[in-house]
Amino acid sequence: MNRRDFLTLSATGIIGLSASGFPLSALAKGKGDKSYSLVILGDTHFDTDPPSVYHSYYNEPNERLNKIQRAEFARNGAMWKDRCPRLLKRAARLIDKDTRMVLQMGDLIQGDCGNGEVHKKMLSDVMNHFKQELGGLPFVTVVGNHDIRGTDALQAYHSFMPARMSEELGKTITKTTFGFNIGDDAFIVIDFNHPDDEEIDHLLNDTKGARHTFIMTHGPVFPSDDSSCRWIFHGGASEKETQARHHFRQAFAQRNAIVLCGHTHCTDFMDWYGDGGRITQMTMSSVWTSEKQKEYTVRSEGAEDYGMLRKKAMEKPENANWKDESALFDEYRPGIRQHSNSRSQGSYKLNVSKKHVTIDFYAGDSEELSHRFVLR
C-alpha cells in the first residue's frame, strides 16, 4: 500500500480493514487530524499493601528470587501508598482537548500472584483504576515481563488483555502484537517477550504509507546501559537472534521509526542514524520509588558516555561476574547523534503536529515541565 492509499483509508475514520489488511480504528479522526497528543506512563508495577491482597498464593521456591521479589512487593506497596497516586493525578492533568489516548509501556502490574485468577483480577483492577483516574480515555498497554510472571500468568494475560485491548481500541485484537492508527500515523505494538516476527513484518508492510511509525515495545530496541543490556528486542547473543535484531533494526530505520519503550526504570533518549535511516528511542518509567527521583538529573550524555555506566558498575566487586558487553555498545555508538540517561521517574506527554514530534517529561508530580525531548 502506498502513502496515498494509506492516507485515503485512514481518513475514513471507520472501524474496519484496509485493502491490505491493516486495521483502521475509530481513533482515526479524519483527514484533518494532523495534530494530537497522547499521555504516556512508563513501567508502573501496580501493587498494593498488604502483599496478601495480590500475593497470598505467591509460591516462588527459589530462596534468592523469593527474597528479591518480596522486597519488590514492599517497594511497590510503599510507592503506591503515596507517590504513584500523586504521579497518576499529575498525568491526568496533562490531558487536554487534543489528547486521544493513554499509552503504558509494560510491566503494568507486579505479577507474581501465584494464581491465574488473581493475576487477571490484578490486571482488571489496574485497568479500571487507571481508566477512572485518566478521564476514561482509551488505554493501550504493551506486555512486559512482569505482566506474565508467575503461576499461570502467561495464560491469564493472554485470556484477559487482547479482549480488553479490543474494547479500548474499538476493533478486534487477538494477539499481544497488534497495530492501530491515529490519523496518518501507524502504531505497532510488539510483544518483546515472545516476538511474533511474521506479524511484525506484516504490520510494517501494511503501513508503509504512514506519516510516522511508532513502535511500542516494553524492552528497548537499543541496548540499555545497565546490567540487563541484552534484555532488548531480539537481544540474545545467538546467531539467530543477532540476525533477527539486525533485520528489524534495518526495517525500523528505513521507516525512520520512533520507538516508545520502558523496562529499564530510566528516562532515556536515543537518536540514532544507520541502516539507511533513523531510529529515535524514548525509554520511560513511572516507578517512583524515592522522592529524589522528582528531580530531572542527567547521569550520562552523548555517544562517548554510552555503555560507560555499565562498565563502571562492572568495577564493583559484587558485579565481577558480569559479562563484558562492550562490543554490543560499540556496534551502536557510531550512529548516535543524541543520547541522555536519567533515573528520574514521572509521566510523559507525546505531542504530534504537522512540524514536530516531542515528548514532555514531568518528573514525579512536578507541575513544571522537567524536560522536552524533540523526536522529530
Image: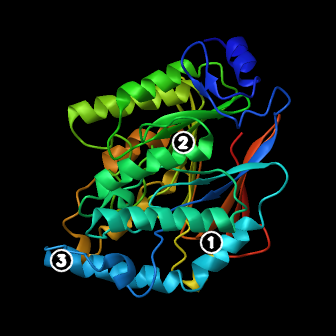
Tag 1 and tag 2, C-beta contact below 8 Å: no
Disc 3 from disc 2: Cα separation:
39 Å
Label 2 element class = helix
Q: Report whether 27 appears left or right of 96.
A: left
Q: Residue at x 68, y 18 (%)?
A: 6
Q: Report whether 129 appears left or right of 195.
A: right
| Residue labelled with disc 3 | 64
Q: Residue at x 39, y 47 (%)?
A: 329
Give the quadrant of residue 192: top left
Residue 287: image x %, image y %?
52, 71
Question: Residue 297 has which mark?
Answer: 1
* Camera-side residue of 134 and 218: 134
| Residue labelled with disc 2 | 166
Query: Mark 1 or mark 2: which is in front?
Result: 2
Residue 275 visible, this angle: no
Q: Report whether 57 appears left or right of 370.
A: left
Query: Mark 3 or mark 1: which is in front?
Result: 3
* Camera-side residue of 55 and 315: 55
Label 3 element class = helix
- Quadrant (top left/top right/bottom left/bottom right) for the C terminus: top right
Crowd tier of the residue under label 2, counting other residues whose Cα lies within 10 Å: few below 14, some 14–19, many 20 or above: some
Dot 2 amino acid type = Ser
Q: Residue at x 43, y 54 (%)?
A: 224
Crowd tier of the residue under label 1, counting other residues whose Cα lies within 10 Å: few below 14, some 14–19, many 20 or above: some
Dot 1 amino acid type = Thr
Disc 1 from disc 2: Cα separation:
38 Å
Q: Residue at x 62, y 24 (%)?
A: 16
